Image: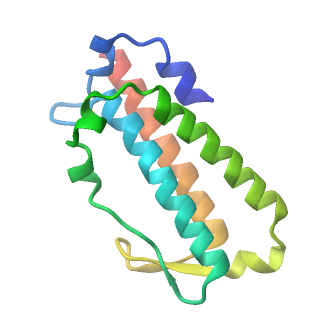
Amino acid sequence: MKYKELTQHLSEEDLEKTYREGSWTIRQVVHHVADTHLFHFIRLKHALTEENAVGVIGNVNAWAVLPDTQKAPIADSLQMIESTHKRYAYVFANIPASDYGRTYFHPFRQINVTVPQALDMVIWHLKHHLGHIEIALRT
C-alpha cells in the first residue's frame, strides 16, 4: 500500500511537514484518510441495504484538530486504511451487478451517488491526499 510505503518510516519531524502553508500535517492527512475511508465504507453499506439512504458526514476540519489526529501514531490509521481496502475489495467482488445502481444521498455534495461512483470517489480521495503527502515530503 502506497500510504504505508511513504509514511511508515517517517520521523516525528517529518510527520509534522505540510504540503502548503496552513495545511494539514502528514500525520493529520493520514488520520483524515482513515476516518473518511470509514465514512465512505459505511455510506456504501447504507446504499446496499437501504432505500433512499443518506450518507453519514462529519466535520473533518474539526476532527483534524482533535488530539488523536494531531498527535497519535499513524500506524493504526495505516492499518485502518489497509483493512478498509480489503473490505471494499470483498464487497465489490461479491455484490451482484444489479446492486451497482443503488445509491445514497451525499449530504455535503447534495447529490445521489451510485455504488460505482462511490468507489470512484474513494479512489480519487486516496490519490488526492497521497499527492499532498508527496508534496509535503519534497519540502
Residue most toward the bottom?
51
108 is higher (above) or lower (below) than 134: below
34 is higher (above) or lower (below) than 25: below
The quarter of the picture where the N terminus appears is top right
Horizontal side of residue 63 vs 109, given as left or right: left
**Within the image, what quadrant is residue 79 found in?**
top right
**Within the image, what quadrant is residue 41 found in?**
bottom right
At horizontal 36% and vertical 10% (from top left) the residue drawn is: 11
Does the rendering let one see residue 24? no
Foreground pick, 111 / 48: 48
Q: Give the colour scheme of this rendering.
A: rainbow
Horizontal side of residue 2 vs 61, given as left or right: right
Does the rendering let one see residue 5? yes
Residue 47 at what x, y percent from top left?
60, 77
Horizontal side of residue 105 vs 97, given as left or right: left
112 is higher (above) or lower (below) than 12: below
Q: How many marks?
A: 0
The quarter of the picture where the C terminus appears is top left
At horizontal 58% and vertical 65% (from top left) the residue drawn is: 118
Residue 64 at what x, y percent from top left?
25, 44
At horizontal 77% and vertical 54% (from top left) the residue drawn is: 90
**Within the image, what quadrant is residue 96 found in?**
bottom right
At horizontal 44% and vertical 34% (from top left) the residue drawn is: 131
